[in-house]
Image (spheres, rainbow, N blue to C red):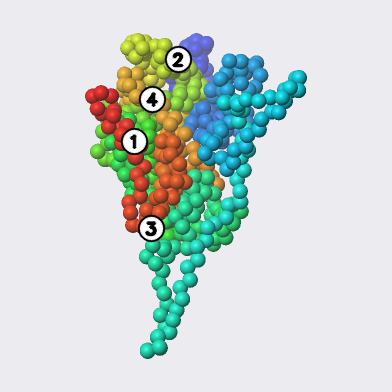
Amino acid sequence: MDEPVPSYTDAVSSEDWERTPTSVKQLVGHLIERLEQLEKQHQDLQNQYQLLKEQVNRNSSNSSQSPSSDPPQVKKQGRRRKSGKKRGGQPGHPGHHRHLFAVEQCASVNDYYPESCRFCNAPLSGEDLSPYRHQTVEIPPVLPEVLEYRLHQRVCEVCGETTRAELPAEVSAQVYGPRVAAIVAVFSGMYRHSQRMVQQAMLDVFGTQMALGSINNLRQQASEAVADPVEEAKAYAQQQPVVKSDETGFPQGNADGNNPDQRKGWLWVMVTPLVTVFQIFLSRSQQSAQALLGKTFDGILISDRHSVYNWVSLVCRQVCWAHLKRDFTKIAERPGISQAIGEALLKQEEKLFKLWHRVRDGTLTRSDFIETVKPIRAKVKSLLTQGASYQIGAKEKTPLAKMVRTCRRLLKMEPALWLFVTTEGVEPTNNDSERALRPAVIWRRISFGSQTEAGSAFVARMLTVVATLRSQERNVLEYMTEACRAAREGKPAPSLLLQQQPLAQAQDSPAA
C-alpha cells in the first residue's frame, strides 16, 4: 500500500481503499494535506483576530488604562443604578450650610431692629440674644506691598572716591519676598499652571508684573526650600507599618544634559495615612522601587503585581484586588475555556468584596470573615491551578496562552492575595495610590512632563508637600511661605511631620 488510510476515509472500507488507484490516493493525500494547512491557517487567523479584538476592546475595566481614555460606548464600572429619586438632599438629610466667619473677622457688624409689629403695627422693644446672621463677603483689590530702599552715594573730599550706602542686614537682596515665591510655587505645583499662566495670574490678581525667568527662579527657590522636609517625610514614610505604592509615566527632557539617552521618566508615589511622598526616576526598575521604599523596607506593601516589587517578601505584600479584577475580566473576555475560568474568578471576587464591605461597616467580625473567606480562597486557587495546567508553547501568543501565563504568575504570588483578610489595617486595593497619582497625571497631560532634572524635582516635591499637608488639613500657602522665609534666613524649614509625630508616639504607647 502506497499510503496509510487517512482518518478522513473512515467511511471507506479497507478493501475499497486497496482497490483505489494510486493517482487517486495521491490526490486525496494532497487534498488532506491542503485541508490541514487551511485549518491551521484558519486557526492562526482566528487567534490573531482574538488578539486584535482584545486589543481594540481594551479599556479601564480590563487593563491599567485610565478611565478618561475609555471610548464613549464603554460601560463604566461601579456606576450606581438610578434610584428614581429627585436630585439634591433627601428627607431626613442633615444638610450643609454656608460657613459663617467669626465676628472678630468681620470688618463691621451692623445691627438692625424691627420698629413695629408686622401684623398689628404696634411698637416693639427688647433685645434678641440670637439674631439671624447674614454676611456678605468681598475681596478688595490686592495690591503688592512695595518697599523701596534708596542707597545714596557720596564723594570723599579727601581722596575723591565715591562710596555708596549698603542695604541693612535685615533687608533681603531678593526682589520678591518669600510669600511671592510661595504663591508662584502654589500656582505652579498645586494648581498646575504653566509659567505663562502664573505670569498672567500674578499680574491679574496681584498687579505684579514678572518676567518668566523670575518665575522659574522662584519655583527653584521654593523647591530647594522644601528639599529637606521632603527627605524627612520620605524617611518617615519608609518606616511606616503599611505603605501603598504605584507609578506612572512622567517624561523628563534633556535641556540640562542630565538625560542624554532620552530615557522615559517615571513618577513613583508612596502613600501612608498622613504622609505621601513622590519621586521621579528615569526608570521603572527594582532599583527605583528600592530607592523610594528603602532597601531595608520591612513593612507591608500594597501594590499591583508589577515585578519590580518582587524583592519584597510575599508574606509582607498585598496585591491590589482592583488590578486582579481587571485581570479576571480580561480572561473572561477571551473565548473558550478562558471565558469560563474568568467568569468563575469574577464570581469569587464579587463574593469576597461583599464580605469585605460587611467587615468595613461592622456587620461582620474579623474572625467570621477569616472563616468565610477560606472556601473562596480555595476556589480561586483551584481555578488558577486549572488555568495554569494547560500546555502551551514557549512563544505561543494565543488567547489561551495569555490566560495560562496570567494564571501561573498569580499562583506564584497567591499568598500575597489574602494578607488583608487576616491583618488589621491592610486594604485589599491600592486605590489610595492611584488617587494620589491623579493630579500628577493631569499635570503631565497639560505640561508634557518636565524638561530638566530640577523641574522633575520641583514636581515631585510640590506634589509631596500638597498631598501631605492636605491629609493633615494644613494650609499649603502658609507652609510654603514659612519654608521660603526660613530658607532665605538660613534657618531649617518647617517639618512636614509636625502633626504626625505625636500621633505615631501615641500609637506606640501601651495606653493607645
Is residue 498 in view?
A: yes
Q: Where the C terminus falls, by quadrant?
A: top left
Dot 1: element = loop
Q: Are marks 1 and 2 in contact (CB under 8 Å)?
A: no
- Label ID, residue 354: 2
On the picture, is 34 further left or further right than 373?
Answer: right
Q: Position of residue 395 (x, y in %)?
A: 40, 33
Give the spatial CA distance, label 3 vs label 1: 26 Å
Rendered residue at 41%/30% (across/down): 430
Name which quarter of the figure residue 124 lies in: top right
Q: Are marks 3 and 1 in contact (CB under 8 Å)?
A: no
Rendered residue at 57%/26% (across/down): 129
- Label ID, residue 427: 4
- Mark 4, Cα crowd under 10 Å, few <14 / some 14-19 / many 20+, is many
Type of amino acid under label 2: Lys
Label 3: which residue?
Answer: 488
Type of amino acid under label 3: Arg
Q: Are marks 2 and 4 in contact (CB under 8 Å)?
A: no
Q: State which mark lies toward you, 4 or 1.
A: 1
Which of the two labelled residues, at mark 2 and mark 4, occupies the earlier sequence position?
A: 2
Q: Nearer the viewer, residue 243 or 506?
A: 506
Dot 2: element = helix
Q: Where the N terminus falls, by quadrant?
A: top left
Label 1: which residue?
Answer: 500
